[in-house]
């Protein structure tokens, strides 16, 4: 090899190395982009699931008739999942959807606040009047008692399972009296009030006979409101007995005999056989991932603060 070829040879080697290095960098970059896109896709799917993004079932329900489902589960209270705010919002969304063939209110509730139940009952009646062409049926699974039945009475029809628990048409107010325990421990109750009845049903004071009578009158009044709602909702279907409004509960099979329910049925059977719309869309208001995270974070913070205070108090 001549001296004049030497520089060309070195240049070719350098160019070859540079090309190989460039190809390797490009390949590494392509794989890097691929894995970044894969990670982004995975994160997107996780967020869609976490934030209750509308799934395929709801997407399929769009544009054609479907059965609207609203769940009322647990104790009816203003802070729970079965609050009037949540149930009413779900029912309004279900009725406002032009593709809704019918609405199912699935109930698994032992009762709760008569105020919250009354608000839901009133809204169901309003929506039924506004959307007369859209039926609303209540489906009882495990239990529909007390306030749960207060709500169900507003439905067009009530479907049950033969082993469901139905009824408990009554009102209660419970509590405890600690006066005996306080006497044994030598604790004196010092209660000052401005107003003769401000200490109404104070658990740390002896029971006042007048207060007891007043409380019983309130319970009777609310009970009569409950009875009126049931009679209005069930109408001629109701076969009243002396103990129907006594607070007793019955099986689903017995509730049919008493007129407290109409037929046996489930969510799927009603969607398929009654509404003729097997596609079911869930309108139930559910906390999203952010709300769940915030609640859990708040609970963890509270627990941490409590533990810190407990440690401080021990030293």
Image: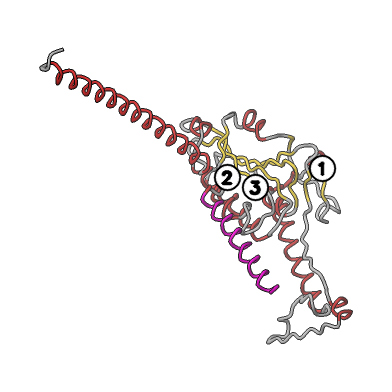
Secondary structure at badge 2 equals: loop
Q: Nearer the viewer, residue 19 or 1?
A: 1
Q: Which mark is residue 72?
A: 3
The CA span between labels 3 and 1 is 20 Å
In the rendered image, residue 183, in percent from the top left (x then y), is placed at 87, 81
Q: Which residues are magenta?
A: 290-315
Pointer 3 local density, CA inside 10 Å: few below 14, some 14–19, many at least 20: many
Identity of the residue drawn at 56% across and 56% down: 297
Q: Which mark is residue 251?
A: 1
Instruction: Name the main secondary structure of what is drawn in magenta.
Output: helix
Secondary structure at badge 3 equals: strand
Pointer 2 local density, CA inside 10 Å: few below 14, some 14–19, many at least 20: many
Q: Earlier in the sequence, mark 3 or mark 2?
A: 3
Q: Quadrant of the C terminus?
A: bottom right
Q: Earlier in the sequence, mark 3 or mark 1?
A: 3
Q: Quadrant of residue 246?
A: bottom right
Pointer 1 local density, CA inside 10 Å: few below 14, some 14–19, many at least 20: some
Pointer 2: what residue?
Answer: 284
Secondary structure at badge 1 equals: strand
In the rendered image, residue 236, in percent from the top left (x then y), is placed at 74, 45
The image shows a total of numbered marks equal to 3
The CA span between labels 3 and 2 is 8 Å
Identity of the residue drawn at 71% across and 49% down: 109
């Amino acid at each position: 090899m001549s001296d004049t070829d030497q520089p060309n040879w070195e240049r070719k080697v350098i160019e070859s190395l540079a090309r190989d290095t460039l190809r390797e960098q490009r390949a590494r970059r392509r794989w890097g982009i691929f894995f970044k896109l894969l990670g982004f896709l995975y994160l997107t799917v996780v967020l869609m699931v976490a934030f209750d993004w509308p799934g395929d079932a709801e997407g399929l329900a769009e544009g054609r008739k479907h059965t609207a489902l609203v769940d009322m589960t647990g104790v009816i209270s203003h802070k729970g999942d079965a609050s009037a705010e949540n149930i009413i919002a779900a029912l309004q969304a279900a009725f406002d959807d032009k593709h809704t063939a019918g609405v199912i209110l699935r109930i698994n509730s032992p009762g709760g606040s008569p105020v919250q139940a009354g608000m839901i009952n009133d809204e169901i009646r309003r929506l039924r009047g506004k959307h007369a062409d859209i039926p609303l049926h209540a489906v009882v699974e495990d239990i529909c008692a007390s306030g749960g039945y207060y709500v169900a009475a507003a439905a067009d029809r009530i479907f049950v399972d033969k082993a469901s628990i139905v009824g408990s048409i009554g009102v209660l107010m419970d509590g405890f009296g600690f006066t005996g325990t306080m006497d044994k421990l030598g604790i004196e109750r010092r209660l000052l009030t401005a107003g003769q009845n401000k200490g109404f049903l104070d658990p740390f004071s002896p029971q006042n006979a007048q207060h007891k009578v007043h409380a019983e009158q309130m319970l009777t009044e609310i009970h009569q409101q409950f009875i009126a709602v049931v009679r209005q909702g069930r109408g001629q279907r109701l076969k009243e007995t002396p103990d129907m409004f006594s607070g007793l509960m019955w099986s689903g099979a017995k509730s049919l005999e008493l007129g407290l329910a109409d037929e046996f049925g489930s969510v799927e059977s009603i969607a398929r056989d009654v509404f003729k719309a097997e596609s079911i869309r869930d309108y139930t208001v559910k906390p999203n991932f952010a709300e769940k995270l915030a609640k859990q974070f708040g609970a963890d913070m509270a627990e941490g603060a409590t533990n810190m205070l407990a440690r401080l108090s021990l030293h």
